[in-house]
Amino acid sequence: MSTIPMPRAGGQGLYSPSMRRRVIAGTTIGNALEFFDFTVFSFLMLVIGPLFFPEASSYGQLLLTTATFGVGFLMRPVGGMLIGSYADRHGRRAAMALTLWLMGAGCALIAAAPTYVQMGVVGPVMMVLARLIQGFAAGGEVGVSTTLLVEHAPASKRGFYSSWQFGSQCLGVMLGALVVTLLTAALNPEQMQAWGWRLPFVIGILTVPVGAYIRRNLEETLAPVATGLGHEAGRAGTGPQPLRRVFVEHKVVVLKGILLVIGGMVSAQIISFYMPAYANRELGMPATSTLSASVVVGAIGFLTAPFIGMLADRVGRKRVIFWSRAATVGVLLPSFHWLVSAPSTGRLMLVIAVLGLLLALQTTPVITMLPELFPKAVRATGMSVVYGVGISVFGGFAQFFLTWLLHVTGSPMAPAWYLMATVAISTVALFWIRDRTGQDIDSQEA
């Protein structure tokens, strides 16, 4: 009886070098487009706030806008669970196509949303709905795309392959910040408020067909059902529901994974997205300078992630994560104090560059470790649940918490203290997680 060939453990056997390069390129481009769509909202908060919450104070506008940004993260665990489960039953490629179209739908809603003056609360409601849709899509995207990269990779290069997930996120952030920076420089404030802020979301809509075309040609790693195959691992649509298996059989691993990702998620939200608003509002720096800092963060992450992935493959994930987080905790207070004492574009860029490099060093190997924690049959689901819950509870509302903390304490050092605490607590998880660098993750239950 004929059977369908199964991919060998560690991504070896069926995948040629050219096929693997296509997967890296296709995943990177598609993921970057999605993160452009998801994160560009953050760089426009100071423009969007007065348009959609005009009756609130300036502090209230920022608080409400950061909350609107944060609600997108509420749907990440839901999207991770449902889309991850779909990917473990029907294939990674189909799930990745779904997330792309959902992200585009969210962009369309934001681009078309009327302001408060035009239609009252209709505009804010559309904004929240759009962010929920985008959060649902992003929650599934990261787990599924990382799983695809890991499953195509040789065991000795999983860190390098999965590094492109984080690198592509940084590319999307860089492009989003760059587009908003150019618009801010080219348009006057009246033009930005009238129509300029909508342009990045229109660009996001237009990129969806490009990403969908690229992903349509990616090779699937989840083998189809075949009569006569004697095991279920890695077979589409077989066995118990992946979501149920994750919470019943791997609940302890899920808790460890969530604790592990907290530090990186909060770091990413503060360093990549909050710093422009913080430098502009709290330190009085010009918007173009602060947005340029986000471009720097994105560029550093995109350019260094592959090399960090190779380093993690060579010396181990845990070692890179631990020392980069220790360095992060060590430099935060001096960096913020130095910046706050004499704010300038040069100081902001240097602080952002250092923190951006440390962010890449801690996040790249974490993204590799998460799918290595789970067996193939539930890998996309497990990865998506861990990532979605971690970023939803702690990362998504980091900007909201910091806006409140700055208002309550009056201390410009609040972001540094908050970030130090979350990174330190998150690092504790490393002591209870097995480092599977270079090991076969498909021959036995992870």
Image (cartoon, grey):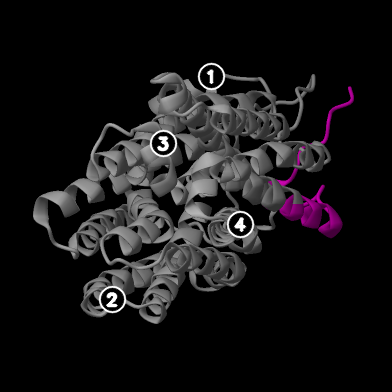
Element on which disc 2 rests: helix
Q: Is residue 253 above or below residue 353?
A: above
Residue 339, numbered circle: 2
| Residue 166 in view | yes
Tag 2: amino acid: Leu
Coordinates of residue 155 in the picture (x, y in percent): 64, 58
**How far apart are labels 2 and 4 at the CA level?**
25 Å
Q: Secondary structure at mark 1?
A: loop
The label on residue 328 is none
Compared to residue 25, the image places residue 400 above or below, namely above
Query: Pointer 4: what residue?
Result: 175
Q: Mark 4 or 1, which is nearer the eye?
A: 4
Q: Which residue is mark 3?
A: 51
- The region drawn magenta spans 1-25
Q: Amino acid at mark 4?
A: Leu
- Distance Cα–Cα, label 4 vs label 3: 24 Å
Eyeballing the image, is 223 above or below 145? above
| Crowd band around label 2 with a 10 angstrom C-alpha radius: few (<14), some (14–19), many (20+) | many
